[in-house]
Every structure is written in structure tokens, then in C-alpha cells.
Image: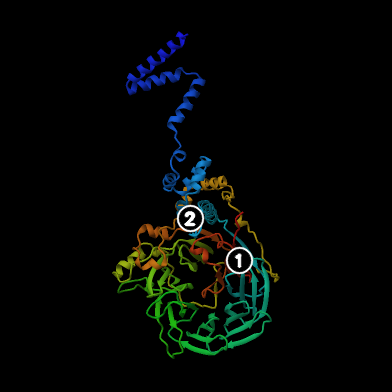
Amino acid sequence: MVDHKDCGDTNKVLQITNLFKDLSSEEKISTLEEIIHACEPTELKFLSDRLEIFLKRDFVRYLPNEVCVYLLSWLDPISLGRCCLVSKTWNDVISSCLPAWVRACKSIGWKVNDSNTSGVYWKKAYARALTRIKQLKYGSAFEEGYLLGHAARVYTVKFNGSNLLASGSDDHTVRLWDVDTGECLRTIQTHTCADLAFDSCFVYTASFDNTVSCWKWANGELVRNYRGHTGAVFSISYHEERDLLVSGSADKTVRLWQLSTGEQINMYHGHREWVTKVLLKKSKVESLHHKPGDFVVLSMDKTLIKIWIISKEVNCECLGELSAIDSFQGPCLTSEQEHSFFHPQLLFDGSRIMCSSDRGVMEWDFTDYTLTRVTPHCNDPTYLLGAGDMMLFTADTRENCLFIRMPGSALENQSQNPKKLDSQISASTNHSNLSPSPETVDYEQDSVNEPSCSTSTGHRPELLPRFSSRCTKSDNSVTPTDESVDVASHLASHDDELVNDINFNNIKMSADHHKSASINHDAANRSCAILGRWKLPLCRWSKRGSNYVCGDQSWLNGFSDVNNSGLVFAAALPNHSIYILQWSEFT
């Protein structure tokens, strides 16, 4: 039996539907609006549920995984982190997007190990990197402490690359410290130290008494002296493999010694000022003068850096000479340019030479000794503490501040027009920030810009305190956990400005410096980008660069899971203590 009522209802629906189809688009919209107003809540919910099926299609659920990964890889990492919170399906797909997370890690200077092919691993690595960068920006990346024990001015501090720090003082002692615990492991009686170098068995000291000496850590025994200089010895460097030690002195000479016997092998002449820094290093590049693996000697006074070959030849000529005025081009130099000076320190990694000057942080290619980069000072001239492919570590001695910053852009090849080369640097240098030409510098005196702080009365080896009020955790920093959703929440919580301020993709590596394009104003602005700033207590800044030291510098080539820990910086203070700065732990 046919239900005539149901047939009538069906006919009505069909008639209404047919009438609706015949309406224009505007009429349909008006009709729907009237229908919506006439609906009850139950009917509106039904309408909402049905519309979601037709309008909100989850492309991640319906498209092949490869296509989804390709589409999502175009998003920036912060947006990817937010997308991870949409659903578990989205989180799983985005977490497997390896190229996007590797690219994200590289963009903020995190070292990438190509052997690891897990997208989840690099997603978590990116979250850890953001945490460290945020700590740098907001001043919570470091912990500070103090080593007490010396009874007179500390002239030199040196770091061995692991956890040992050695210090030499005017109290005629050299101390060996464990920077992790603050314990003084050794104290030996010596002469006044201007500089030192050490290993696990011996410590070599340069002194104002014109000698270099070798001492045993175990019992403080004097093993041998290296005699010959006629002025204070300011710097030493040695290499046990080659059985060589090199020294630089106020007598304006550089001397090469046999490490094991103390015999003088050669004496290099040519400096017109006191030699304040010497290095004995292996070359990593090939040129007309040396091949990879050859040892070379570098020496510096306040205006020149000289490169010497290791030889017994008398009156040996230097291989090359670098000047603090190399960045000034043109036939005529101003009085200010003619009196441009180097600042500590001299760095050499086997392929490039770096030093700070009045003009900026200068970098030379060791293959042909050409100037390849000048990173201008942002404010006052700064001392160079460490340098890598990704970052520079500098100190403003007037403000007593440490800066972690991006390097400047590479210069064009110097075969170009000299005026054009000079304009590249001038475009990113504010000459009004350059300090007046200094007078004759007393290299035995330290620079202290304020009245001395109170003198410590205790001499017990101690680390005070491990945690400073200046290194409390940032309220906004969130440590990633093993849970994927927590990592996603951590990524989504970071603002875009933090990431946009830090982009290492455009930094040319040292091997490409002489091939890269000239400086423009955008690059000049980037070269002053400050990634982190840390206010120091009142430090003694030696003009020789001997009483402060950078810790492990591998993080300047890019952060990783293992290289942002341990000592960052150490310096002598006016109260005879040693200030140390270490990486804080992820909590």
C-alpha cells in the first residue's frame, strides 16, 4: 500500500529543489539566507555538519604522502610547528619532512650531520636550536663564576680545549684549574708570567725577565730556560710534534727554539714595534710558499702581521706582510688611516688569518694573503675573541660587554678598482665611531675603564657562584621533550621575528670569500646583527690580549648537540680573581 503522504512530501521537496535550481546565483543566496533564518538549532547543526564535509577537505589525509611533504616543505619552520598542532596525521607527516627541517636547522646555524635521515630528529634539533638562540637573545645562555687563589695581578690565562685553564700571575705562581668544579689542581712557583702555554705534563712561561721557561706540573721543577731575548717576552707558541717553540718580544724579534733542548734555531727580524703575539700553526691550504701540512710562524705587532717560513737560514725573509691599513685603498691615506692599529687577538685556523683593527674585524685568505672580508665594528672598536664560519665572538672593552654576531659579507677580489673596494667597506662603516689614533701603548699595562672594584681577601680556590642573578632562565624559553606534541608547541610558541633576525643561509664560507659579490647596504646591516650580548663585570683588558681567553670555539662554526657546553670565556679581574663564563644547560 502506497503512503500518499510520503509521496506528497517527496513531490514538495522535488518542486522546491527544481525551483531553487532555476534561480539565479543572487536569488539562491537570498533564498538560503531566508531558510537559515527559519531554521531551528537542530536544523542549523545538521547544516553545519553537512557543509564541513563538502567545504573542509583535509588534503593531508587525501593526498599522497610525497605530495604533502613537498607542499608543506614550502612553509617556514615556525608555521610548520603550528601545523603540527592541527592533528596527529599532520604531525606525523610534517615530522617526516626531512628536507624542511634540515634546511631550517642550517638557516639558524645548527650543524647538520647528513648521516642522520630522521625528520623527527632534526625537528627536535631545530627546537633545541631555537631554545639556545632565544637564551642568547634574552641573556640566559650562560652561567658565570669566579676562580679565587692568586694574590697579585693575573697577567695571562690560557684554555686547553677541554676543561683545564692555566693562569700566570705577578705573585710568581702558575695555577691549573678545573673550570667545571672550580678546583685548583696545581700551583707551582715560577717567575712573573706575561704569557704561557701548557699540556698535561709541562707548562711553558714567557716572562718580563726576558726568558722563556719550561716547568713540570707534577712537582714544579724548572726543566730548562730559553735565553736570548733582550726584552720582555710577550708571547709564545709551541708544537710538540715538530719539537719547536716560537717567542715574540719587546726587542722586536721573533725567535725559533728547539723545544726539547732550549737551543735557538733562528731569529726573525723585521718588526718595527714590540712583537705582542706569535703563532706556530699548520697550513691547511696550498700556495706558492707552503703546502697543506707545512708549519708556519705568524707574528704581530700593533701595525703589522708577518708570516715566516720555518728555516735555519740567517736573515730569513718573511713570506708575507699584512697591515692594519690593508682595507684602506687609494693613492692617499688620511692621518687617521695611517695610524690604524691592530687589536687583540690574532687568529689563524690554517686557511685564513683574522684580527681586529680600528676599521673592523679583518680576514685574509692564507693562499695568497689577500684581504677577503672586513666586518665593521657596530660601535667602538672591539677585540676579537673567536671566529668561525657562522659567527664572530667579540668584546667591547669600553662597555665591558661580549657580543656574538654575524660576520660581514666578503669583499670582491682586490684586483678591482681600489676606490671601489674602499667604498664597499665604507658603505658599512660609520667613521664617526672610530676612536682617535692612540699614542704609544704600554703593553705591560692593562686597560681598566673604571675605578678598581673591592679586593678579594680570600685565596682559597673557589668558584663563586655557579649560578648568577644575571643568568636566570628566560620565562619564555621552553625545553623540548620527547613528546612530539610538546616539540610542536615549543616551535609554535616562538615568534617569527626571532627567526627572521637570524639567518645564516647567505653567509659565504671562507673558501668562497674571494669569489663572492661586493658588499651592499643590506649586507652591511646584517654584518652588525647581534645574536647575543652579555654584560661583564669590570675586567682587565691587556693590550697584548693575554689575560682573557675564549673557550671552545667550535660553536662559532654552527651549534650542535655537543658543542654548546663548557667554557665560553675567561678573564682576569682587578681583584686578582678570574671570571669564567660557561654555557648553561638545557633544562
Q: Residues within 10 Å of mark 1 (few under 14, many from 20)?
A: many
Disc 2, SS: helix
Would you place residue 158 above or below residue 7 in this image? below
Would you place residue 496 above or below residue 256 in this image? above
User: Mark 2 sits on what residue?
Assistant: 105
Residue type marked 2: Cys
Q: Is residue 507 left or right of residue 85?
A: left
Location of residue 422 by image quarter: bottom left
Residue located at (44% from left, 44% from top): 68
Residue located at (65% from left, 75% from top): 175
> 48 or 311: which is nearer to us?
48
Front label number (1 vs 2): 2
> 389 or 193: which is nearer to us?
389
- Label annotation for residue 580: 1
In x, y percent, where is residue 154? 61, 74
Residue type marked 1: Ile
Would you place residue 460 above or below residue 133 in this image? below
Q: CA distance from mark 1 to mark 2?
A: 29 Å
Q: Residues within 10 Å of mark 2 (few under 14, many from 20)?
A: many
Residue located at (50% from left, 18% from top): 40
The C terminus, quarter of image: bottom right
The outermost residue toward the front is: 1
